[in-house]
């Protein structure tokens, strides 16, 4: 992207200002408090918008900081730029009541929609946070912000998968973890249902076993009682008849002996004795358990048999039901021992996560090596080969190789630190952007550079081939550019 023209209607202290920019280096000079930082904020606001913050964030809100006091409804302006082979015009009004953004393609007259992401596409899908941490450097912001480390990690993970944005490994990982959590919850619910079902079946089995036990006890008790009652009642009844018969014979014998004379008494006595002996014989025979059953006893025993049969039938039904529950219980145990569908899907997700994470590590190492190599290359150019080896960790912490040893960056001079972070910013910017890339905007970024460092930085910026907007309150950048015979445009703010 090449910014061709800025027209500021009303933004902070800048009103009705127009700047025409060119390719290569544009040196914008202005005294302190002349509006250089305001111009820097205007450029970012035109490219990325200027939302109004709420709450505590409003304390550092650029919307309030640059809102004009006079004629605030004209809060904004326009920006013309080239992207690819087409020219575009972007108009913005930042005022909260009249907010609008209009994007026109001046090459073919087509009106694009900022709210639908057309401008984001032209900017290469670069966020404001990434831009401000790479190619756009505000005052006293040499060290990249913490958000850059996360953006770089995300980018490095996706770098080798294609630059069209169709695949974002970080988002894919987040999605898979959410799916895994959902599967785990469903698996837990499934196991909970099985456990509740098993407890219910177990309780029913215990109840049936208790019922069957009761039936068995009732059966045996009934069998025993029937046998005892039948035997005792039969014996008592027959005993009573025998004794009555024996008593009657004895009385009859005495009466006959009283009335009969002589030999008749002896015969009667003999017959009485024989009758009594026969009664005794009957009594002994009735006491024998092998004596045949009476009709009454048979009826009684039939009823007992029917009752026992009914108990056996009920017991059998309960046993069949118990057998069914036992089969169901075994099926539940087998189902609990097997992995349910949610656990299988969770394992599949774990495998996908593991594979993706291993792939991401491989890709990150590969792309991190590219980023580190490019940073070392830029740093070597900036330091004329004095420094060219460094280590960058995942949080963009840096160690520098100096005099045959590794040194923490905080232990070198401020000028060297500035060079290292400038090299890192430019390397990350190149990594994120393809083709023309966004303009490099530097607001007093070389204040800590000596002349040698400044010359090296200006030479590198000229050779990088990108549009550079350099905001400064000093004349030495102009002097160095002229001394180095570097083509540039000088503008006064």
Image (spheres, grey):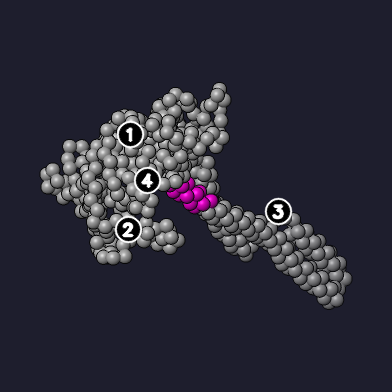
Mark 4 touching mark 2, by CB under 8 A? no
Magenta segment: 178-195
Q: Report the front residue among 399 and 260.
A: 399
Q: Is residue 103 visible to us here?
A: yes
What distance separates the C-alpha of mark 4 from that of mark 1? Answer: 15 Å
What distance separates the C-alpha of mark 4 from that of mark 3? Answer: 135 Å
What distance separates the C-alpha of mark 4 from that of mark 2? Answer: 19 Å
Q: Mark 1 points at which residue?
A: 481
Choose the circle earlier in sequence order: 1 or 3. Answer: 3
Query: Does 400 sit left or right of 44 as displayed?
Result: right
Q: Report the front residue among 417 and 285.
A: 417
* Residue 473, numbered circle: 4
| Crowd class of label 4 (few under 14; some 14 to 19; many from 20; radius 10 Å) | some
Question: Which residue extends farthest right?
Answer: 262
Q: Mark 2 points at which residue?
A: 12
Element type at mark 3: loop
Choose the circle earlier in sequence order: 4 or 3. Answer: 3
Q: Report the front residue among 202 and 13.
A: 13
């Amino acid at each position: 992207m090449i910014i061709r023209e800025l027209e500021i209607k009303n933004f902070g202290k800048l009103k009705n200002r127009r700047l025409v920019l060119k390719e290569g280096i544009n040196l914008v000079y202005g005294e302190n408090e002349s509006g250089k930082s305001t111009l820097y904020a205007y450029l970012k606001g035109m490219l990325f918008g200027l939302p109004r913050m709420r709450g505590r964030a409003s304390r550092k809100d650029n919307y309030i900081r640059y809102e004009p006091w006079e004629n605030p409804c004209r809060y904004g302006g326009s920006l013309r730029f080239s992207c690819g082979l087409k020219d575009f015009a972007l108009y913005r009004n930042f005022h909260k009541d009249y907010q609008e953004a209009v994007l026109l393609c001046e090459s073919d007259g087509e009106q694009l929609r900022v709210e639908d992401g057309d401008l984001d596409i032209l900017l290469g899908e670069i966020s404001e946070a990434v831009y401000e941490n790479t190619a756009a450097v505000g005052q006293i912001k040499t060290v990249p912000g913490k958000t850059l480390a996360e953006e770089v990690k995300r980018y490095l993970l996706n770098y080798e998968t294609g630059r069209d944005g169709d695949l974002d490994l970080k988002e894919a990982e987040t999605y898979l973890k959410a799916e895994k959590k959902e599967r785990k919850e469903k698996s837990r619910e499934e196991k909970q249902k099985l456990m509740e079902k098993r407890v219910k079946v177990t309780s029913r089995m215990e109840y049936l076993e208790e019922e069957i036990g009761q039936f068995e006890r009732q059966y045996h008790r009934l069998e025993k009682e029937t046998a005892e009652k039948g035997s005792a009642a039969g014996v008592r009844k027959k005993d009573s008849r025998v004794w009555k018969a024996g008593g009657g014979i004895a009385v009859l014998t005495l009466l006959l002996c009283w009335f009969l004379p002589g030999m008749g008494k002896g015969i009667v006595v003999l017959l009485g004795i024989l009758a009594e002996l026969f009664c005794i014989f009957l009594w002994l025979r009735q006491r024998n358990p092998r004596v045949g059953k009476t009709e009454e006893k048979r009826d009684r025993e039939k009823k007992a048999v029917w009752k026992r049969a009914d108990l056996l039938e009920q017991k059998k039904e309960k046993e069949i039901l118990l057998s069914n529950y036992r089969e169901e219980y075994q099926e539940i145990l087998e189902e609990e021992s097997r992995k349910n569908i949610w656990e299988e899907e969770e394992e599949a997700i774990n495998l996908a996560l593991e594979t993706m994470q291993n792939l991401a590590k491989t890709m990150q190492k590969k792309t991190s090596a590219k980023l580190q190599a490019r940073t070392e290359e830029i740093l070597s150019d900036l330091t004329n080969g004095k420094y060219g080896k460094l280590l960058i960790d995942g949080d963009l912490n840096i160690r520098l190789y100096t005099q045959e040893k590794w040194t923490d960056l905080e232990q070198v001079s401020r000028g060297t630190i500035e060079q290292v972070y400038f090299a890192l910013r430019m390397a990350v910017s190149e990594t994120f952007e393809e083709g023309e890339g966004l303009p490099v905007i530097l607001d007093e970024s070389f204040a800590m550079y000596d002349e040698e460092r400044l010359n090296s930085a200006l030479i590198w910026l000229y050779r990088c081939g990108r549009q550079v907007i350099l905001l400064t309150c000093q004349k030495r950048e102009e002097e160095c550019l002229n001394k180095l015979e570097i083509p540039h445009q000088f503008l006064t703010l």
